[in-house]
């Protein structure tokens, strides 16, 4: 199984910017989620981020919040999500990244949680509300189990904090493109370009940009600014939720292909 770091090394050797779609587990149901992961894998995704629905998703905008609410109403909980991942992960070429908040991890126990996600084939972990100051134990345990914990850099972070996060982050660095929550935006903030430059002077780790990217031209723009990966969430979640499950799967396949095309080098 190729690690996230190894996967980025391969992509860099090809001069390729990674596409990382995000979907919410259990919306509309876990059977569709399993199919969606395979659809994304077959239609241009390089890595895939899977959100575990949570009742208080502070970092998520209205589209993903609504998806999490629907999934929770259908009794989507961590254990069924991991059972589904165990079945589908061997079929995926793309490394799978789990997105979850810190409280469910603490409730289960950090070591047990990490052991369980590693066992089912999860290779990366994003915890949007994990403070750097409290991350050391989790980072070490995850490293021992072969799970790479991807830390987020906010646009409001100080230079010293950016350097500290960049040094600690595993797999790649998740650069948040805007202040506030996730969601679709029509224009990206120019300061993302400057933050990428600042990060590049600090680290040679891959950098992925997320939050607010919803169109192929925005994905292309972020790639041209120097990002190693483009992370797209709400635009996928919205498409998957519209119409029947079959229509949703068709919509995300088409959208994934359009993003992949935008990220192809001329």
Image: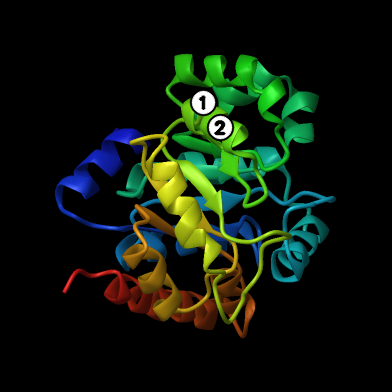
Q: Is residue 113 above or below residue 33?
A: above
Locate the C terminus and report the quarter of the image it occupies: bottom left
Q: Is residue 263 above or below residue 92?
A: below
- Answer whether labels 2 and 1 touch (C-beta < 8 Å): yes
Q: Which residue is mark 2?
A: 165
State how many labels appear. 2
Classify residue 102 by image quadrant: top right
Name the residue located 67 percent from the left edge and 37 percent from the top edge: 79
Looking at the rendered structure, the secondary structure element under dot 2 is helix
Q: Is residue 221 above or below residue 30?
A: below
Please tell me how crowded label 2 is: few (under 14), some (14-19), or many (20+) other residues with Cα within 10 Å: many
Does residue 206 appear in this view?
A: yes
Name the residue located 30 percent from the left edge and 49 percent from the top edge: 93
Could you say where residue 12 lies in the image, as x and y percent from the top left? 22, 47
| Residue toward you, 56 or 92 | 56
Could you say where residue 152 lies in the image, as x and y percent from the top left? 59, 42
Locate the N terminus and report the quarter of the image it occupies: top left
Please give left or right for residue 50 compared with residue 107 in the image. left
Residue 144 disc label:
none
Looking at the rendered structure, the secondary structure element under dot 1 is helix
Could you say where residue 151 lies in the image, as x and y percent from the top left? 56, 37
Please give left or right for residue 132 compared with residue 14 in the image. right
Q: Which residue is mark 1?
A: 168
Marks 2 and 1 sit apart, C-alpha to C-alpha, by 5 Å
| Residue toward you, 157 or 69 | 157
| Residue toward you, 215 or 78 | 215
Please tell me how crowded label 1 is: few (under 14), some (14-19), or many (20+) other residues with Cα within 10 Å: some
Name the residue located 70 percent from the left edge and 33 percent from the top edge: 130
Please give left or right for residue 39 compared with residue 186 in the image. left
């Amino acid at each position: 199984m190729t690690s996230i770091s190894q996967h980025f090394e391969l992509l860099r050797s090809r001069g390729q910017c990674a596409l990382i779609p995000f979907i919410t587990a259990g919306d509309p149901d876990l059977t569709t989620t399993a199919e969606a992961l395979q659809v994304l894998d077959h239609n241009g995704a390089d890595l895939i981020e899977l959100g575990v629905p949570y009742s208080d998703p502070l970092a998520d905008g209205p589209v993903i919040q609504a998806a999490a609410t629907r999934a929770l109403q259908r009794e989507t909980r961590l254990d069924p999500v991991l059972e589904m991942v165990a079945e589908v992960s061997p079929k995926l070429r793309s490394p799978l990244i789990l997105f979850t908040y810190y409280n469910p991890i603490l409730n289960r126990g950090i070591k047990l949680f990490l052991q369980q996600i590693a066992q089912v084939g999860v290779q990366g972990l994003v915890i949007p509300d994990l403070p750097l100051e409290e991350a050391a134990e989790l980072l070490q345990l995850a490293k021992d189990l072969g799970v790479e914990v991807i830390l987020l850099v906010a646009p409001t972070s100080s230079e010293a904090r950016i350097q500290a996060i960049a040094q600690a982050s595993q797999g790649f660095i998740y650069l948040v493109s805007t202040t506030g929550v996730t969601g679709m935006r029509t224009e990206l903030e120019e300061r993302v370009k400057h933050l990428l430059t600042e990060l590049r002077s600090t680290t040679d780790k891959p950098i992925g940009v997320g939050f607010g990217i919803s169109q192929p031209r925005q994905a292309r723009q972020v790639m041209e600014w120097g990002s190693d990966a483009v992370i797209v969430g709400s635009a996928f979640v919205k498409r998957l939720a519209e119409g029947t499950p079959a229509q949703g799967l068709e919509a995300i396949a088409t959208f994934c292909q359009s993003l992949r095309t935008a990220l192809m080098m001329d």
